[in-house]
C-alpha cells in the first residue's frame, strides 16, 4: 500500500507539475549550452502563399466580426486567400458570408461534422501553407506573418498559435479556471517547442504545410490534434508561436465547459489508440517523451491515480504509519474542500477566484474519467453539440 501511494502521488504530481519543472530545467540547461534561438521576421516576398480556412456552423452572432477580423489581417497583398465552409448551417451564417466576394464560400445543406467540412475545404487549397481557425475566435493583426515565417525552416511542418481566453473582472469558474489552465498550457507549449516539438495543436489557431496535410478518419473527434500529430509522426516539428493568438470567450458556464472537456477526453482516448507508434518509440525518442508526459498521462491513468492516492493515503494515515501520511492526507482533504467550496460558490454565483482553480482542476479530471467511459461504452460522433460561449 505504501508503494502504491507513493507511485500514485508521483504520477499525479509529475503529470500536472513535475513535467513542467523538468522541462524548465532542461530548457535552462539547453540555453546555457547552446544559447536561445531567436526567430525573426522575414521579408514579405519570402513569406509563402497562404489560405485561411474557417469552418463555421450556425455562427450568425460571430461571423460578421470574424470576417472583419480576417480581412484586416496583415499579410502581403495577393498572398492570402480565404475559404469559409458552412456545411449544415441553418441560420444566416451563409447569407452573411456571401456578401463578401473576397471570401470563397463553400456550403452544403447537410451537416457531416467539422472534419468533413475541413476535408472538403482542403480540396480547394493550393497554397504552400494553410491556417485553420475557429469561427468564434479573433486573431491579432500580425498572426499570419508570425505563423508563416516559421516555414523558412524546412524542419517545421506545423505551427500552433496561442489560445487566449477573454476574462472579465466578474469571471466565473469556467472563465477563471479555463484562463489559468491555458496560461499554464502556453508555458508548457513554449518549452515543448524549444526542446523539440509541441505535442499537438489546438483548433482555435494552427497551420500546416499543404503538402504534409493528410485527411484523418471521418469519425475523428480531435481533428486538429490528429492532423498535427500525423505531421509530427513524419519527422517534422510542431512549433509554438505565442505572438500569433486567437482570442475567444470562455464557456458560458461550468456545465458547458464540462460538456466540452468530456468530448475532448473521449477524443484523447481515440487519438492515443490511433497514434500507438508514438508511444515510447525509439524512432521518436524526444517526441515520445513529450507526448507521454504532456498528453497521454493526463488523458488516461492520472485521474485514476488521484483517486488511488487519496484512498491509500487515507488508509496509511489512519493506520498510524507516520506523521508524513497524516500531513499529506490533511493537504489532500484541504484541497478538495477548496474545490467543493468553489462548487458551492459557483452555484450561488459568488465569485471567489481563489477557489476556482481547485474546482476547475477537479472538473477537468472528472471529465477525463467520464470521457474514457463514454469512449468505451458509447459511440462518440465527430458531429457534436457546440458548447455555448459567453457573448
Image (spheres, grey):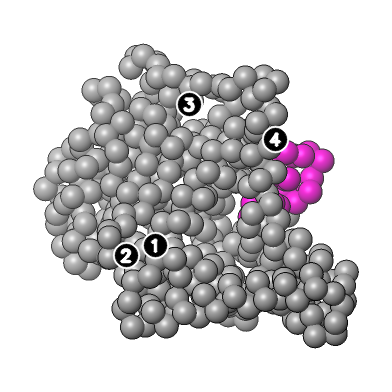
Where is the N terminus found, in terms of image quarters? Answer: bottom right
In the image: residue 261, left or right of residue 283: left
Mark 2 in CB contact with mark 1 (< 8 angstroms): yes
Q: Relative to residue 276, is residue 329 depicted above or below? A: below
Q: Alpha carbon of mark 1 to alpha carbon of mark 4: how far?
A: 30 Å
* Residue at 11%, 48% in the rendered image: 99
Q: Alpha carbon of mark 4 to alpha carbon of mark 3: how far?
A: 23 Å
Q: Relative to residue 126, is residue 354 depicted above or below? A: below
Q: Relative to residue 322, is residue 69 depicted above or below? A: above
The residue that disc 4 covers is 26
The residue that disc 2 covers is 171
Where is residue 48, by image quadrant?
top left
Q: Badge 4: few (under 14), some or many (20 or more) residues near its Cα, within 10 Å? A: some
The residue that disc 1 covers is 176
Q: Which stretch is magenta?
A: 277-295
Q: Nearer the viewer, residue 165 or 259?
A: 165
The residue that disc 3 covers is 150
The percent coordinates of residue 161 (x first, y second) are: 43, 41
Q: Is residue 280 magenta?
A: yes
Where is residue 90, by image quadrant?
bottom left
Amino acid at each position: 500500500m505504501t508503494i502504491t501511494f507513493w507511485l500514485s502521488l508521483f504520477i499525479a504530481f509529475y503529470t500536472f507539475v513535475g513535467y513542467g519543472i523538468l522541462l524548465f530545467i532542461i530548457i535552462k540547461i539547453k540555453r546555457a549550452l547552446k544559447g536561445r534561438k531567436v526567430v525573426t521576421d522575414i521579408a514579405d516576398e519570402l513569406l509563402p502563399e497562404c489560405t485561411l480556412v474557417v469552418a463555421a456552423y450556425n455562427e450568425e452572432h460571430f461571423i460578421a466580426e470574424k470576417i472583419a477580423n480576417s480581412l484586416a489581417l496583415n499579410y502581403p497583398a495577393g498572398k492570402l486567400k480565404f475559404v469559409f465552409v458552412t456545411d449544415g448551417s441553418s441560420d444566416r451564417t451563409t447569407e452573411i458570408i456571401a456578401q463578401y466576394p473576397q471570401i470563397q464560400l463553400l456550403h452544403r445543406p447537410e451537416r457531416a461534422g467539422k472534419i468533413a467540412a475541413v476535408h472538403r475545404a482542403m480540396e480547394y487549397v493550393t497554397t504552400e501553407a494553410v491556417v485553420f481557425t475557429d469561427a468564434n475566435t479573433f486573431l491579432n493583426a500580425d498572426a499570419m506573418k508570425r505563423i508563416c515565417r516559421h516555414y523558412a525552416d524546412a524542419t517545421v511542418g506545423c505551427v500552433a498559435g496561442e489560445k487566449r481566453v477573454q476574462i472579465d473582472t466578474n469571471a466565473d469558474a469556467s472563465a477563471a479556471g479555463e484562463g489559468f489552465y491555458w496560461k499554464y498550457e502556453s508555458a508548457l507549449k513554449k518549452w515543448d517547442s524549444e526542446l523539440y516539438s509541441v505535442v499537438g495543436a489546438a483548433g482555435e489557431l494552427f497551420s500546416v504545410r499543404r503538402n504534409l496535410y493528410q485527411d484523418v478518419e471521418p469519425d475523428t473527434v480531435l481533428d486538429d490534434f490528429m492532423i498535427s500529430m500525423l505531421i509530427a509522426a513524419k519527422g517534422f516539428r510542431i512549433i509554438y508561436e505565442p505572438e500569433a493568438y486567437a482570442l475567444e470567450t470562455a464557456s458560458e458556464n461550468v456545465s458547458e465547459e464540462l460538456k466540452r472537456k468530456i468530448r475532448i477526453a473521449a477524443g484523447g482516448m481515440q487519438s492515443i489508440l490511433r497514434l500507438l507508434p508514438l508511444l515510447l518509440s525509439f524512432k521518436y525518442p524526444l517526441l515520445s517523451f513529450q507526448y507521454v508526459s504532456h498528453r497521454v498521462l493526463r488523458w488516461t491513468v492520472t485521474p485514476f491515480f488521484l483517486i488511488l492516492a487519496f484512498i491509500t493515503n487515507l488508509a496509511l494515515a489512519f493506520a498510524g504509519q507516520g506523521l508524513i501520511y497524516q500531513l499529506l492526507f490533511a493537504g489532500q482533504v484541504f484541497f478538495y474542500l477548496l474545490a467543493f467550496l468553489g462548487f458551492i460558490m459557483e452555484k450561488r454565483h459568488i465569485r471567489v477566484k481563489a477557489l476556482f482553480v481547485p474546482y476547475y482542476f477537479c472538473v477537468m479530471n472528472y471529465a477525463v474519467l467520464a470521457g474514457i467511459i463514454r469512449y468505451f461504452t458509447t459511440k462518440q460522433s465527430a458531429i457534436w453539440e457546440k458548447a455555448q460561449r459567453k457573448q
